[in-house]
Image (tube, rainbow, N blue to C red):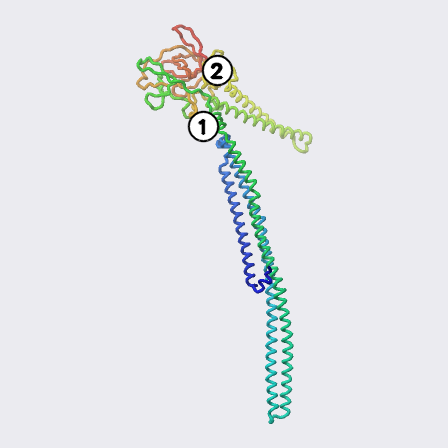
Amino acid sequence: MSWGTELWDQFDNLEKHTQWGIDVLEKYIKFVKERTEIELSYAKQLRNLSKKYQPKKNSKEEEEYRYTSTRAFLATLNEMNDYAGQHEVISENMTSLITVELTRYVQELKQERKSHFHDGRKAQQHIETCWKQLEASKRRFERDCKEADRAQQYFEKMDADINVTKADVEKARQQAQLRHQMAEDSKAEYSSTLQKFNSEQHEHYYTHIPNIFQKIQEMEERRIVRIGESMKTFAEVDRQVIPIIGKCLDEITKAAESVDHKNDSQMVIEAFKSGFEPPGDVDFEDFTQPMKRTVSESSLSNSRGDGKSEPKFGSKSKGKLWPFIKKNKGAGPEDFSNLPPEQRRKKLQQKVDELNRDIQKEMDSRDALTKMKDVYIKNPQMGDAASVDHRLAELGQNIEKLRLEVQKFEGWLAEVEGRLPARSEQPRRQSGVYEAQNASGVNSCAQDRESPDGSYTEEQSQETEMKVPATDFDDEFDDEEPLPTIGTCKALYTFEGQNEGTISVAEGEMLYVIEEDKGDGWTRIRRNEDEEGYVPTSYVEVYLDKNAKDVHKPLQKISE
């Protein structure tokens, strides 16, 4: 099967077909190029998507990624970033292995095709020239034959006419012979030209054209093979990244399988556990005995039905559930005493770790400067050793300050964890609310911190429930007879009563007790007829009167 023998007369059609083949190749190149652009765009969109949902550094959102479900999501984002990288690899490989190579090949193909068809046209022109020469020789031979016939007829006519002179007859005879000779010469030339043309034509159709068409056929077959190989490469480029993409998907699956709902639930407990005990039972308040009923400190109801409790004080102030009051926005106390014990312990531990890291950084800087100073001392030409003394002194001061800070926070941490001994040997009642605050009194810095009546954030308030002094009395009962004194107490620490229903006391102050601790960590005291309220039981030493005798027995302190 050869184009040279089968398609010897289809030069124009072959020219159109080969041009169509080049157009197909260029169309395929354009297709691959657009595919690479799609891959790049897809990779870019995947990267942007992954970046969009990445947690912001040093933000609250970053802290949320400690749960297994959010860590799995973060792993998915990272794997999607790698997944996008593989699509970039596809684009790069298709560009280098297909687009660039085929573009160069198309240019070479066009040059080769142009050369082959130029040779074909040249051969075509040569055979056409030979044909024209043959036609000219044939027409000349035909013309000379006709001239010879006319000259012969004229001679015979002159020879038969008796009136014509002998000289005219001779002249006609010579002319006829000349024409016959010219006809013979034209015949010989025509014969020679015909043989030459036949030879050239045979050479053209059986040698030159087949060779040229064979080269064109080979060129076209190479084009077809090349586009097939490119299509195979197109698939192979995709197939090469499938293992890596599969690995990315495997990692996503692995991350998904690592999600542990039990662990996440436990982490929620660790994150928000306050350490408080739930409120106790609400005492029954008997309104059938006016002016003699006992107020329940743990009541969470309100006779008005507005969700607030109203303790009866001489100042007619409304009682509030201090653990549930919204905290004012802004910085909290340095020792985090506004937080529940468990949360405070975590914050203090984080602060200690942070300060230790700062100390290590400063010590590393100091060691580096010390080595530099030693080098300067040994080699004065490299620098002045005295120039680093000031910086070394600053680093030493910074380290000392940081160490003092660490000691301070470690002391508070030890208080929270109950490692420090109690200030008083007398037993106190247990009150989970004021563990940290009682320890604060040991360091005599309670006045510098937010007192136990400090409020909590909304999040903490949703997770913390406390029994607090409360009552269901309405305003019309505010003029009731004051409760009788049942004992005395001595303030062990200063307490700033900032919330409604509490009273401020100074360390060492003696006051009257009108209601003892019901188990919620509060004792109701009175300074005079117009000043009474609640203070933490752990902040006072209480002496109760029994049987109207001056027998004093201290209450249990909160364990430190």
Q: Are marks 1 and 2 in contact (CB under 8 Å)?
A: no
Q: Mark 1 or mark 2: which is in front?
A: 2
Query: Relative to the observer, which residue lies in front, 119 or 478?
Result: 119
Please give the name of the residue rendered at 30% of the width and 18% of the height, measured from the top-left corner. Answer: 476
- 383 on left or right of 63: right
**Residue 543 percent coordinates (x, y):** 42, 10
The amino acid sitting under disc 2 is Ser
- In this view, the residue farthest toward the front is 1
The amino acid sitting under disc 1 is Gly
* Secondary-structure class at tag 1: loop
Above or below, 382 relative to 110: above
Pick the quarter of the image with the N terminus. Answer: bottom right
* Secondary-structure class at tag 2: loop
- Report the number of discs: 2
**Residue 49 percent coordinates (x, y):** 49, 40
Above or below, 439 relative to 188: above
Residue matched to label 2: 559
Circle 2 packing at 10 Å, graded few (<14), some (14-19), many (20+), is many
Q: Earlier in the sequence, mark 1 or mark 2?
A: 1
Query: Relative to the observer, which residue lies in front, 426 or 138?
Result: 138
**Residue 190 percent coordinates (x, y):** 63, 76
**Residue 199 percent coordinates (x, y):** 64, 69
- In this view, the residue farthest toward the bottom is 163
Above or below, 3 relative to 349: below
Rendered image quadrant of residue 128:
bottom right
- In this view, the residue farthest toward the right is 378
The tag on residue 330 is: 1
Rendered image quadrant of residue 162:
bottom right
Circle 1 packing at 10 Å, graded few (<14), some (14-19), many (20+), is few
Query: Relative to the observer, which residue lies in front, 82 or 299?
Result: 82
Q: Spatial distance from mark 1 to mark 2, Cα to Cα?
A: 31 Å
